[in-house]
Each structure stands twice: as C-alpha cells, then as structure tokens.
Amino acid sequence: MITKPTMKTILAISSLAFGAAALASSTPAIGDGPCCGAKTAKAALASNVAEKTIVETAVENGNFKTLASLLGAAELAGALSGEGPFTVLAPTDAAFAKLPKETVEMVTKPENKALLQEILKYHVVSGKAAAKDVVKAKNVTTLNGQRVDIVVEEGTVMIGGAKVTTTDIMCSNGIIHVIDTVMMPETKNIVEVASGAGSFGTLIAAAKAAGLVEALTGGAGPITVFAPTDEAFAALPEGTVAELLKPENKERLAAILKYHVVAGRVFADQAAKLDKAPTLNGKDVTIAITRDGAKVGNANIVKTDIQASNGVIHVIDAVILP
C-alpha cells in the first residue's frame, strides 16, 4: 500500500543531502556517564570502541580496508567521521572481493566519483539503529534516497540481499552492522527503468513530445511518477493520444504528464497516508485507499515502489486527467 507525507515531508525527502549537518542529532556514546563499578571485559571493550568514530573503527578493525579506501576516494570519510549519528551497513573486504575486479576499478575512476558516492551512501542510514530495532522494520531508507528491504527468517537477517553477520559495533558517532555482500543501488533513471520494463512506450513517447525527458531523468531532482501503462493510454478515446502528440498540443500534453508527477521520493506506505498530493502540474491529485486497493485520481495503483536512481515509480492502470 502507499503513504501520505505532508508537503513539508515531501520537500524534505526531495532535498535530502549527505552530510552531518543534514542528519539527526547525536546520540551519547556507550561509556558516557558516571562509572558504576567494575566492568566486564566485554563492556570495557564496547566502551573503548565507542570512543572511536565509524571510520576509525572500520580502519582499526582490519576487515574493512576496501571500504575505508573507497570512502577516502569518494571523499566521504570526513562526513562519516562527523557528529552523526549514522548506521553503517559495512561490507567486509571479502564482500568486496566477490565483485568483479573491473567493477571496483570502474567505480574508483575519478570520472565515476558520483556513482561511487551513491553506492557508499546506499550503505548508510541516518540515525543510530541497533539490531533489535532493525529486525522490527520491513525496510530502511538510505542516504542514497533509495530503500533496502529487511527480511528475517529463522534467525538470519538479510538487508538488501546481503546477510548480516555481525551487529551492534558501537562507535562514538553511530553503529556498524557487518554484511557479507556489497549492496548495489538502482543506477538507472526513471526513463531508463520504464524503458526496460517494456510497458511504458507511450508514456516515454509522450514525455519526449512534451519536452519532459530531462525532468524525468534527473533534471527536476528526486520525483515520484504515477506511470500509466501502454494499456492505460490505449483505453483513452480513439485518437486522443495521436492528437496529444501533435506539436501544437505540447503544452496540454505536458500539463497532463506533470499531473502524474510528485516532487520527492514518496514510497507506497507514505502515499497511503495522504488524501491528496501536489503534482508538478500545480494541482493536487487525490489519493484514496478503498476495499479494492489504492487509487490515485481515477486510476488503480497496480504496482508500487519501483526504484530508480532519481525517484520511484508506481504503476497505474489509467491516465489521470487534471
């Protein structure tokens, strides 16, 4: 199902930036406060670890050399040494070794710095989430803006397809959970994802005719698209699509398409909490949860939360008209 953030929330989602200043306030480190007697060896070790930042802990651990190196190459080590707090899903050196050698070489090239940053941010969550809290969630939103799913089965915790092997490594500015696989975010933009699906040919053709391709490929920042399928366009009165695609109807077509787009990443659980949402058209579109499912305008939402590098797609079965 889908959720309803306020406009303030939507704008906050769309403007999410990676950096300590954009994150939650810090949480006191383990070991702070008055001493309460002799500590066990385990407690003493936790206290010592919590005096170090996430980056310092990763470097001294010895199993995260590749991660530490990539953080440096992406110029993110400084951010993860900041106040935080952060929760880092940290792939080990063995996890990085699973990747094809050419993949690691590719992302470390200077011209691919932005891509490397997105991959690393996909392993970081704002705030301090201990294992007991993580297992209660269905997913978490990363600093990359995309979500990773959490699955718990028979005592095994999987996050974004990676197995969590060690939890709750406490640091002065957050917490580390160790994973055995490097998670890869979606790197294709909304138009590329839609093209690959094979069900949105008319939508893409209409976006090109309306001059909106740049907005759908990242020019407008993170967005949410309620995407009508080819069948949805075919259900319009005969000749409607052909008429809209004419150059003289470009502005009208753009207005219709913008009515299907909301600023920011609005995931299904967030959209479901809304009665309406402001579109790029300037008008609000209604959102409702009925016995038959979720609706936006007059359309049924048939598939949700298809992630893209610049937003999220929800598939609908009808073209909604402003």
Image (tube, rainbow, N blue to C red):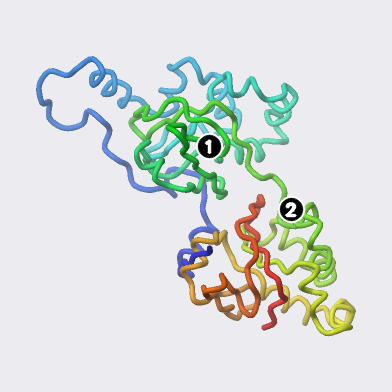
Name the residue type under label 1.
His
User: In this orientation, which residue lies closer to the viewer: 45 or 296?
Assistant: 296
Name the residue type under label 2.
Val
Going by the image, does 27 lie left or right of 148?
left
- Residue 230 vertical placement versus 246 (above, below): above
Residue at position x 63%, y 57% in the image: 312
Element at label 1: loop
Within the image, what quadrant is residue 303 found in? bottom right
Q: Which disc is residue 123 wearing? A: 1
Q: Residues within 10 Å of mark 2 (few under 14, many from 20)?
A: some
Whichever of callouts 1 and 2 sits on the residue coming sooner in the sequence is 1
User: In this orientation, which residue lies closer to the viewer: 196 or 118?
Assistant: 196
User: In this orientation, which residue lies closer to the viewer: 276 or 7?
Assistant: 276
- Residue 277 vertical placement versus 143 (above, below): below
Q: Where is residue 270 in the image (x, y as percent from the top left)?
A: 49, 63
Q: In which quarter of the image is the C terminus?
A: bottom right
Residue at position x 52%, y 66% in the image: 271
Within the image, what quadrant is residue 115 found in? top right
Q: Which disc is residue 193 wearing? A: 2
Q: Position of residue 309 (x, y in %)?
A: 66, 50
